[in-house]
Image: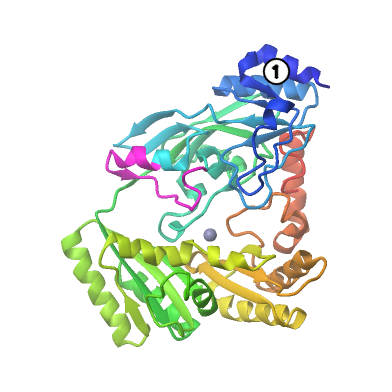
Amino acid sequence: MNGIVAILRDVLGAEQVLDARAAEGRVSSYWDPSPLQARALVRPRSTAEVSKVLRVCHEHGQKIVTHGGLTGCVEGATSDADTVVLSLERMQAIEDIDTVGRTATVQAGVVLQRLQDAVREHGLIFPVDLGARGSCTIGGNVATNAGGINVIRYGMMRARVLGLEAVLADGTVLSSMNRMLKNNAGYDLKQLFIGSEGTLGVVTRVVVRLDEATRSRNSAMVGLASFDHVTGLLRHLQQSLGGNLSAFEVMWGDYFRDVTGAGFHRAPLAREHAYYVMLEVEGANVEIDTPQFMAVMEQALDRGLVADAVIPQSETERRALWEIRENFQPLYRRQPIFLYDVSLPIREMEAYVAEVQARLRKRWPESRCDVIGHIGDGNLHFFVTPGCEGEHQHAQSDEDVYAPLKPIGGSVSAEHGIGTEKRPHLGISRSAEEIALMRTLKCTLDPKNLLNPGKVL
Ligand code: ZN
């Protein structure tokens, strides 16, 4: 079957096709430094070339895994020695920025941060933002329906995609490059590919929706006495600040204490509060927004919603506050550590976290469970460490985190996707009927099961 390398070289040109040996010179992913396993790695430069690759692979029953920035967290782009890896690294053109319609048209291999920087020159923003911004690609963001830290205001990737072009398993090019906010002409086919993790088609070009750049930014980190105070503060900010609240990141007290202290982040507030929130508000007018923000924070203190607050006085101080939320390296001194990304209604969060922690403590009395969340999005992240030796600890921890989600209608993945890591747990969040329809769609679009096989379903 090594004939496929020769055929692909014939179709694309030798320089665009690396063989297994050359592919081994690359790492498997951002998280896994082992050599990449592949029969070949192809680097097409256009949708037409992607179509040629898929047509050839379809004819020969050759399975394909598409690569973007390889920063995903759920083993959604893993390959083996029988796989053709399709890398979109040569499709990096920003084709158009429309400042009137506020759209950008880009190829799938464009790195997120490059698009963010390019549109900022026009006074616009592309507001999907996440820690992996310097490596992840727009195509990967679409394929995984990326979330991140601005979802509360701007939505997930799904809310930012107006149109896209995808290549189907048999090489058919499906171009749905809509640029309008409104388009109700039939089924919204682009949604099939957004969040499908490369299993239904290969996204090659995207039209994304941009927003005006904000001109003012006010931030604070606050300490709070209870979860009711956290939700009370969220409501207060949403009522008082119109749509200007752009981040509301909650840290449970144990998380804050575990990442601050000797040798780690400096604690800007007393370390005994039950909860901490990093919040950010962005608007269009510094003269109006900053006094308004101060007044709203004052009210929060007067009403007893907030026990203590720190407002950064410089960009350096602001960055230092964000580091507490974004740089959780101190937690990784504990090994093993299991990371979770679940979602559930905000009203259920306090009891759910308490139940998960109680289950874990019962199983492992020395266990640690730190929690942070984009709670406005219903999204929590857990860091679980058993604190003792044992076998099958990851599976046992999964059980303790996922089982209590079912009765409250929660999801085993808020923003990371399913990949292979969460595939055994899909049934907790989706019904048998839903999964059956997913299988029907997969069979219809990819009858030979060649696109990212074994992922999601
Ligand atoms: Zn997150």
Residue 45, compared with residue 196, is above or below; it is above
In the rendered image, residue 261, in percent from the top left (x then y), is placed at 47, 76
The residue pinned by badge 1 equals 8
Residue located 70% across and 80% down the image: 366
- Whether residue 244 is visible to the viewer of this picture, yes or no, is no
Decide whether the magenta segment is chiefly helix, strand or loop. Answer: loop
Which region shows up in magenta? 116-135
Q: Nearer the viewer, residue 260 or 339?
A: 260
Q: Hey, which quadrant is residue 303 in on the image?
A: bottom left
Residue 422, compared with residue 236, is above or below; it is above
Q: How many marks?
A: 1
In the rendered image, residue 246, in percent from the top left (x then y), is placed at 37, 61
Q: Amino acid at mark 1?
A: Leu
- Whether residue 328 is visible to the viewer of this picture, yes or no, is yes
In the rendered image, residue 300, in percent from the top left (x then y), is placed at 32, 81
Residue located 74% across and 32% down the image: 38
Q: Residue furthest left?
A: 287
In the rendered image, residue 291, in percent from the top left (x then y), is placed at 19, 70
Decide if residue 205 is on the left or right side of residue 150: right
Please state, as top left, top right, bottom left or bottom right, where the N terminus lies in the image.
top right
- The verdict on residue 73 being magenta is no
Decide if residue 58 is on the left or right side of residue 321: right
